[in-house]
Amino acid sequence: MLISTVLSVKADGSGFTGPSIDDFFPPVLLFPGTPFEINRLMAIRILVVVLLVLFFWLATRNLKLRPSRAQVGFEYLVGFVRNGIVYEPLGERLGKRYEAFIMTLFFLILGMNLTGVIPGLQLSGTSAIGLPAVLAIITWGVFIHAGFREKGWKYLKDTLFPPGVPWFLYILLTPLEFLSTFIVRPVTLALRLTMNMIGGHMLLVLCFTATQFFFFTVLADGNLIGLLGVGTFAFGLIFMVLEIFIEVLQAYVFAILASIYIQLSVVDEH
Amino acid sequence: MNIVGQLAPLAFGLAVIGSGIGVGYVIGKTIESVARQPELQGRLTTLMFLGVALTEALCFIAIAVAFIPFPAP
């Protein structure tokens, strides 16, 4: 109640402005009017891709049989991702075939997500639907292709008409299986990533703009309610740590779901 | 007394109750199973993520509903 009165008193222009969905559609910086418009989000994405290519080029440029300290760290990271995300669900044989794809997914999404907490950038490359949608569509294509490559047309039969149920259940089951496999899977992949990033960004922006407002508008007016800014600032810092965790987790979830979907379309059901 | 605002966040909150309970249940059961049979952890983790993905899908559908342009009454 107290907060809302303070906020409403200040609603005349100098008041509190929270985050909005427009944060994710910043003004165009370069090439306006063409299909290649570059805004802050696109600039961040390009920067992340350049940094990732640079990182992997530097890390794999000079590999030795007796590794240096940095190489041990790099191999530990890559090995953890490979064993935990690719080989665990897929097994060794299929894992070798799809490890490049899934590890690319993981590191790309991780890099894009982490820009959400880096000061100065503060906007995740994945927080507009475009990039996650492209990645989800590629994953969709890859798991369907994996099924056809492994089982041929039997893949569609196994997916749409799962064996071992009485025939009249197919009236119910086939549309549901079609929906959940070919439509819900890619849509939720894209939406999960985007919505997590949007939510995290909103939370952080809300905390820090509130801190700014409390300290420099309310407290500067001599109103002691402005000391609430200490609390919002502390919450902002806590949510920042939480946000880093969520960003790593979402990259992990996207990659492991991609490999689980590939495994599900390849596995032989009896 | 007039209350002005959006109903969409409220609806999303209601929708999330269900999938929140569902996700918690799936993960809790997985932890329980791993505690009983630690050697199955890899297989169970895979199944857990599959279950979580399916359960969570409901709350993402709930988010998407807010963006569907329903005709005004």
Image: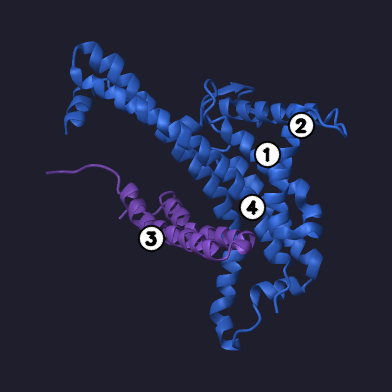
Chain colours: A blue, B purple
Label 4 environment density (alpha carbons within 10 Å; few <14, some 14–19, many ≥20): many
SS assignment at label 1: helix
With respect to residue A19, does A225 lie above or below?
Answer: above
Residue at figure coordinates x 55%, y 33% from the top left? A124
- N-terminal of the pair, mark 2 or mark 4, is 2
Q: Earlier in the sequence, mark 4 or mark 1?
A: 1
The residue under the point 77% across, 72% down is: A153
| Spot occupied by residue B67 in the image (x, y as percentages of width and height) | 44, 49
Q: CA distance from mark 3 to mark 4?
A: 24 Å
Q: Is residue A153 above or below residue A220?
A: below
Q: From the image, state whether disc 3 or disc 2 is nearer to you.
A: 2
Q: Chain of mark 2?
A: A
Q: Secondary structure at mark 2?
A: helix
Disc marking residue A107: 1
Lateral position of residue B38 relative to residue A142, left or right: left
Amino acid carrying label 2: it is Phe
Instruction: Tell me if residue A226 can be seen.
Output: yes
Q: Is residue A21 visible?
A: no
Q: Which residue is disc 3 drawn over?
A: B18
Q: What residue appears at the point 53 percent right and 29 percent down from the top-left corner?
A: A123
**How much space separates mark 3 and mark 2, taking CA atoms?**
42 Å
Instruction: Choose the circle earlier in sequence order: 1 or 2.
Output: 2
* Residue at mark 3: chain: B
Q: Which residue is mark 2?
A: A56
A18 vs A152: above or below:
above
Q: CA distance from mark 3 to mark 1?
A: 32 Å
Q: Give the secondary structure at mark 4.
A: helix
- The amino acid beneath tag 1 is Phe
Three-letter amino acid code at the position of disc 4: Ile
